[in-house]
Image: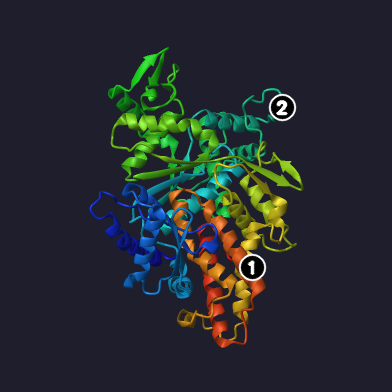
Amino acid sequence: MLAAQKQRLTELFQAAVAPLVAGTDLQPNITLERPRDPSHGDVACNLAMQIAKPLKKNPREVAQALVAALLDNPANRDLIESADIAGPGFINLRLTAASRQAVVKTVLQQGAGFGKSNLGNDKKVIIEFVSANPTGPLHVGHGRQGALGDAMSSLFQAQGYDVTREFYYNDAGVQIATLATSVQARGKGLKPGVEGWPESAYNGDYIQDIANDFLAKKTVSASNGEPVTASGDINDIESIRQFSVTYLRREQDLDLQAFGVKFDNYYLESSLYADGKVEKTVEALIKADKTYEQDGALWLRTTDYRDDKDRVMKKSDGTYTYFVPDVAYHTVKWQRGFTQAINVQGSDHHGTIARVRAGLQALDIGIPQGYPDYVLHKMVTVMRNGEEVKISKRAGSYVTLRDLIEWSNGETAEGETRDLTRGRDAVRFFLISRKADTEFVFDVDIALTQGDENPVYYVQYAHARICSVLAQWIDGDEASLTNVDLSPLTAPREAALLAKLAEYPETLQKALEELGPHQVAFYLRDLAGELHSYYNAERVLVDDEALKMARIALMSATRQVLRNGLALIGVSAPARM
């Protein structure tokens, strides 16, 4: 159902219910939904059951009164074809054929704008995702964050929000020190397993690559960073640290480019310390009397904010625990004008949520409860050749995002330029095709198949199939399709396809409200299924000119919605498969 139609129906219900609640304090909430069973109609409403009890009336009698008022209202203007009362008082409406067919013209007129709205009214939203420690290549979990975060950012932009995509680099702390000592050990000729190799060191082959470039005094640079030239002195641990972090930031940049993910801003954890923001945050919490000292450590009273126990902020050795810079960082987000902040992270970050929110509330600077929002994803298991893959030689202990893209891309013919579009499309679609809080098995073998079991191929093939049909249309003036008579579109499969097209704008809004971009992937699979079913049931290029043109318009509109949805999740829409 289109937004304009939904608004008209809401107004019709408001007019119908007004006489029934006159003189009462009732303020009915008119909710219009799609019936689960399409045979029940196009729209369902529970308004009668909502007001019957306080009015002390039979809900079916109330429903009958509402239906009569709806159908008698001149403002109906051929919107409603019929209305039925089901069960205890549900009102099921069936829209007129013209109302259902109107979606085609709307899609063709709005084009790439179909599904978009100004709901956000340019409200500033920051979505932080990936935010990998610069200690190694991006792994599959980072890929899931990249797919989710980028699609979510596009969702918010499509609904009129001013979105900033941000990558937060944890370039300070123990892990960075471990990175530097690992590179130093490699530079001295040590290898994993030999005497003298640091116990906590990173074992991947990439550490040797960094050490080689450091000894060669190479220069590296990364996004939003100054170039760093290695000193070549294997005893200069600070130079090793700076060079290693920048080297790996550059590597992560290349992985993200291959994945088609771009960020508006990169924020360094180290800057929070350099600018004194961490220290100022701690001082503000002390001044607010939200801390206390015990056993030589500084504690935050997080139990005042529904945490299960108080948390250490500053350990007895003078170092801060990891959630403290997070509090400082989110304070900065708020001060930058982001009244909504969303973090896409792994489920292992669940324990930090209460602590970060407690710290922000304790500062008492106007930050609302529940800030920031979190979308936590569970792990991804990678299967290849029927077996689980756990280790990448390059990374040492995990499958990298680059591995997954290249495996899913398939073999490249000798002499052919390596185009990773296919692999990128498969990985991005697969990684958002499940709700974030569910574990997911990525089967590379399925990603390489060209059949219905491969969801991204299934959707892209629907788009290519339409392109093939339209290419056979000799007259081919798509601009003229907005004026086509759509009344011949009465076949059952046409009705199903029309209904699915009309669901797209509501799907985007629901996905945004629930922070669930997986719903877009679900929708695209359903739309592709309706298209394939229609294609197999009906011929498009028939002899009947009026029917042919109506079906061509329907095909063009379906192709546009497939393009819009695929673009939103960062997947290509090929014209040929």
Left or right for 20, reference 323 = left
x then y, percent, for residue 520: 53, 56
Asked if residue 251 can be seen in this view, the reply is: no
Q: What is the image's colouring?
A: rainbow
Amino acid, disc 1 = His
At horizontal 36% and vertical 47% (from top left) the residue drawn is: 53
x then y, percent, for residue 10: 36, 61
In this view, the residue in front, 426 or 336, is: 426
Left or right for 479, reference 289 = right
The residue beneath circle 2 is 193
Sequence order check, earlier mark of 2 and 1: 2
At horizontal 33% and vertical 48% (from top left) the residue drawn is: 56
Label 2: which secondary element: loop
Q: In this view, does 538 lie above or below 159?
A: below
Residue 175: quadrant of the picture = top right
Which quadrant is the N terminus positioned in? bottom left
Amino acid, disc 2 = Gly
The residue beneath circle 1 is 532
Left or right for 519, reference 125 = right
